[in-house]
Image (spheres, helix red, strand yellow):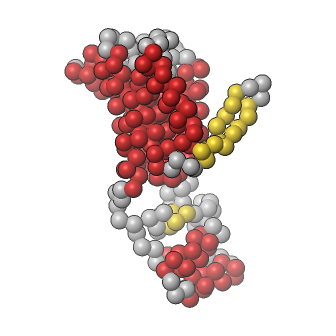
Amino acid sequence: MVSWLIIAVIIFTLAYSFIKKFPVSQAIVIANFIIFIITLYRFPLEDLAFRPSYLFSYQIYTLFTSMFLHGDFYHIFFNMIGIIFIGFPLENEIGAKKFVLIYFISGIFAAIIYSIIEGGNNYLIGASGAIFGILGCFAAAYPFKKIAVPLFMPIILFLRLPVIAVALLYASIETLYTFAGITDGIAHSAHVGGFIAGVFLSPLIKMKFVEKKEISLDDFEPLITNERQRAIFEKAKQADEPELRDAWLSYLAKDLKCPKCGSSIEIKDGIRCRKCGYKK
């Protein structure tokens, strides 16, 4: 019964993120914490954890479910920190559909590489393989994009570093641990596998899943509520070049509010509100 509850939490949070246009990276964090709380009550993690022998059995579904299980507070805390500081900005760059593909394919590939290198029947749990995948993808696609990196000292300090520097540091450490055969209870080979998968999946970022929708000036006019917005709108209408027109519309969008909930809107495959799902 608890296993089914955990699976329901995973499906519900992911479905909710797409239906309500809620960032999927945030939905993954929420699902992980809910499931961690559920498993605190003596739930046997082995029921949904993955191990190499499952690759050729009906329990292969644990490749997916194991990504939402964590052994203790420190395990989930540091993994979720990874999603927050790497996953959030990457999803903001590439969108939810591409992010979710890269995240889960990397996590699955990480478990497969772990099975090939480690073998045996040790259980594998945690989101770290998928997190290393999004790190590898981020570094390959946007190497000089800066991300915030928390340093845990007597006080928490935040450094902004190019993602390539963060990726090379962590990938080097995990590779060294893997080939040194260090056994410390951490699946370093899965981290390496996830990172490699993310790098090779980075071309997905350049692919168009759907043709970009052409935004009409008529879509903006009903949202205009004051003279300043009207003036910007008129400049967009008078622009001779498409690039200049789009620049004025982007500037206008920053000042417009969603007619349903009053939140800010964005131009992304049309006019939409991330908070309530309004789309035009």
Give how far across and how far down residue 140 sits, in percent.
46, 45
Give whichever of 40, 242 is nearer the camera: 242
Q: Is residue 253 visible to us here?
A: yes
Q: Is residue 20 left or right of residue 110?
A: right
Q: Residue furthest right?
A: 154
Give how far across and how far down residue 198 sits, in percent.
41, 39
Find residue 1 and report its image quarter: top left
Find residue 45 and report its image quarter: top left
> Relative to residue 50, is residue 257 depicted above or below?
below
Q: Residue at x 46, y 52 (%)?
A: 95
Q: Residue at x 39, y 66 (%)?
A: 212
Count of number-bearing discs: 0
Q: Is residue 64 visible to us here?
A: no
Give whichever of 184, 60 is nearer the camera: 184
Q: Residue at x 27, y 24 (%)?
A: 60
Q: Residue at x 34, y 31 (%)?
A: 109
Give how far across and how far down residue 43 sits, in percent.
45, 14
Give whichever of 89, 206 is nearer the camera: 206
> Relative to residue 34, is residue 230 depicted above or below?
below
Q: Is residue 213 left or right of residue 75?
A: left
Find residue 63 and report its image quarter: top left
Give how far across and how far down residue 272 sits, in percent.
51, 63
